[in-house]
Amino acid sequence: MQSTHITFDNLNQTGGLFTQLLRARHHHFVELHDWQLPNVRGMEFDQYDTPESVYCAIHDDDVVSAGFRLTPTTAQSINASYMLRDAQLGLLPGLPQTVLDDPAPRDPGIWEITRVFVSDNLKSRDRQRVRREMAVNLARLARAWNVQSFLCLTSVTAALLTLKVGFDLSPAGPRFEVAGETCQAYRLQLAANTARSQAA
């Protein structure tokens, strides 16, 4: 199992893997969960896939098992900023404007986590190993990009899993239903003991 961080600056080395990450996202979000998302030739992408985002792919060679996208809350690209802020501004009809309790931040130390997925083909033991690898990479990226905390929107069930992989979690908005799942916005910070182990 390998972990690769992808940015638009290293696409000359990671472009093929980035394509596989978009294909894996398509399989997970469009094919399995029937989300109505932009896609072309079996690749899923949206207005937040810009040079301001950073990606993590967990993979064996070019087979992507999991991944996520990070976007700074200072991002601005044409008519988009970041997902939770745009939802609060009423620009994303599928999400409520009340998604956050407070005004969406514009802070270089706060980043948004989106498009988090783990392959459905993994056994339960391997899924837990992959989640821990994702947490390790989230911590690495936080240090590399000077991130103090994260915002994310996820199902309540998935959010509880973050408590098992070294993150402090607190609600950032009310619960609501999306495609039959109870979802909520959360703030995430690396737990103190995890931060110490990552620094060692």
Image: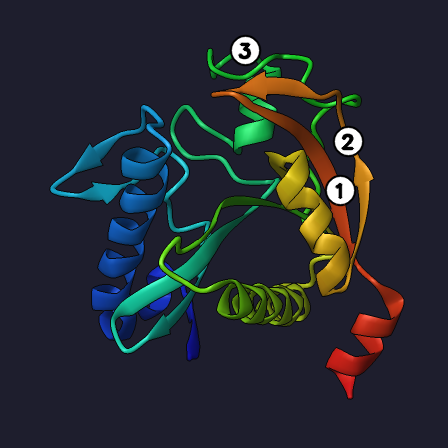
Mark 1 is on which residue type? Arg
Q: Quadrant of the C terminus?
A: bottom right
Residue 117 location (% of width, % of height): 46, 50
Label 1, label 3: how far apart the Cα atoms are: 21 Å
Q: Can you say which quadrant of the picture contains the N terminus?
A: bottom left
Identified at 30% across, 34% down, the residue is 30
Q: Which mark is residue 174?
A: none
Where residue 161 sits: x, y (%)? 68, 52
Seen at 68% across and 44% down, the residue is: 159
Q: Are marks 2 and 1 in contact (CB under 8 Å)?
A: yes
Amino acid type, residue under disc 2 in the picture: Ala
- SS at circle 3: loop
Residue 151 seen in the figure: no
- Label 2 residue SS: loop
How many other residues sit within 10 Å of disc 1, few (<14), some (14-19) or many (≥20)?
many
Residue 17 sits in quarter: bottom left
* 92 sits to left or right of 43: right
> Can you identify the residue that label 1 sits on?
187
Where is residue 149? Give x, y as percent.
74, 51
